[in-house]
Image (cartoon, grey):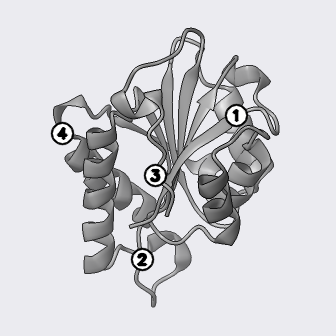
Amino acid sequence: MAENSSNTASGSYRSGVKRLIIMRHAEADWGLNDFDRPLTKRGHEQAAAAGAWLAARGYIPEQIMSSSALRTRQTTTWVSDGLGAKAPTAHLDEGLYEVSASRIIARINSVSENVHSLMVVSHLPGVQDAAQRLMSPDSDPNASMDVYYGFPPSSIAVFEVPGEWALLDGADARLVDFKSF
């Protein structure tokens, strides 16, 4: 999977540029109703590795919005553990469960402009569709191919957003990194 070493990897921001991290929940178990599916042991490991990777790359979110489904809540907990002391408290959002790309983007549009780094943890197909919709033409080509190829459990797409959250709509965020665990 693509790992671009842009200036965002160091955690620095270009003036006026925000960071958006879109993540699919880690691997979940089957057998229960969909909303209450827990992570597998592998899912716990994936989410912890994802948090450590985010921290190592300097992709530290100031705010985390997570679907309120059990598997996304557990993913967020393990990601936060990997982020360490810098991890913000996640905001659980029922509006991020079983939603389209348009709904995910609408949730992003409502974020305060004081937030410079946002992480969204949700489900397929919404996360992949949102990532594809947001990619600008100048996105990293390898990361872009990875997003189109698939968005397996515990995948992360990292974007630079050059303007306001409220104006984010389509083809206006630069995909700079993509990683699957």
Where is mark 1, residue-wise? 173
Quadrant in which the C terminus is drawn: bottom left
Seen at 35% across and 29% down, the residue is 10
CA gap, disc 1 and disc 3: 17 Å
On screen, residue 38 versus residue 45, left or right, reads right
Q: Nearer the viewer, mark 2 or mark 1?
A: 1
Q: Nearer the viewer, mark 1 or mark 3?
A: 3
Which amino acid type is marked by label 3? Glu
On screen, residue 111 versus residue 178, left or right, reads right
Where is mark 2, residue-wise? 28
Q: Give the mark nearest the N terminus, 2 or 3.
A: 3
Where is mark 3, residue-wise? 3
Which amino acid type is marked by label 4? Gly
Q: Give the mark nearest the N terminus, 1 or 3.
A: 3
Q: Give the mark nearest the N terminus, 1 or 4.
A: 4
CA gap, disc 2 and disc 1: 29 Å
CA gap, disc 3 and disc 4: 22 Å
CA gap, disc 2 and disc 3: 25 Å
